[in-house]
Amino acid sequence: MTEYSVELTDIALSAIREQARDIAVDAQAPLNAERWIERIWDAVATLERWPCRTSLAEENAYVEYEVRQLVVGSHLILFTVDDEHRRICIVGFRHGHRRPRPGDLPAAEVELGSDDPNV
């Protein structure tokens, strides 16, 4: 089975880092933050082999491209799948109890074939 490559937008990476910082600093739990971020990256790595096992995200209804979600604990990793180029682009990240914020996602599908996935 051919694996997919995984790329992140700046928006998604910033949201993940912000949550890790909140755990480490605001909750004064740096070890928990380290374990949490490890779980996130481990989950992201599973997308390399089985990206389409996940359901569509609520955000899918608000954008012109398909957005899927991977649930990790109480958080959602939002991503697109480009089967033709065997690439995944993580376009967003949010707590599962937060309402969808389609304005936080790229307005158009990220061109995964380009050199810059952070469109």
Image (tube, rainbow, N blue to C red):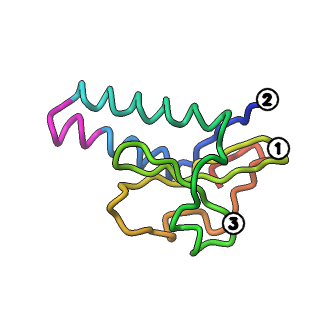
**Which residue corresponds to the image point at 38% horizontal and 32% vertical from the top-left?**
37
- Residue 51 image point, x, y percent: 65, 43
Please identify, in this view, whether the residue under mark 2 or under mark 3 is nearer the observer: 2
Is residue 49 part of the magenta span, yes or no? no
Please identify, in this view, whether the residue under mark 2 or under mark 1 is nearer the observer: 2
Read off the magenta span. 21-29
Q: Which residue is mark 2?
A: 1
Which image quadrant for residue 26? top left
CA–CA distance in space, label 2 to label 3: 25 Å
Instruction: Report the amino acid beneath label 1.
Output: His
In front: 69, or 92? 69
Name, please, the residue furthest toward the front.
53
Which image quadrant for residue 95? bottom left
* Mark seen at residue 65: 3
Note whether 57 is above or below 31 in the view shown.
below
Graded by Cα atoms within 10 Å as few (under 14), some (14 to 19) or many (20 or more), the crowding at tag 2 reads few
**Which residue corresponds to the image point at 18% horizontal and 31% vertical from the top-left?**
29
Note whether 16 is above or below 61 in the view shown.
above
CA–CA distance in space, label 3 to label 1: 16 Å
**Which residue corresponds to the image point at 85% horizontal and 47% vertical from the top-left?**
84
- Residue 44 image point, x, y percent: 54, 36
SS majority, magenta: helix
In front: 43, or 105? 43
Q: Is residue 108 left or right of residue 90?
A: right
Earlier residue among tags 2 and 1 = 2
Earlier residue among tags 3 and 1 = 3
Is residue 28 part of the magenta span, yes or no? yes
Note whether 65 is above or below 6 in the view shown.
below
Q: Is residue 27 left or right of residue 19?
A: left
CA–CA distance in space, label 2 to label 1: 14 Å
* Mark seen at residue 85: 1
* Mark seen at residue 14: none
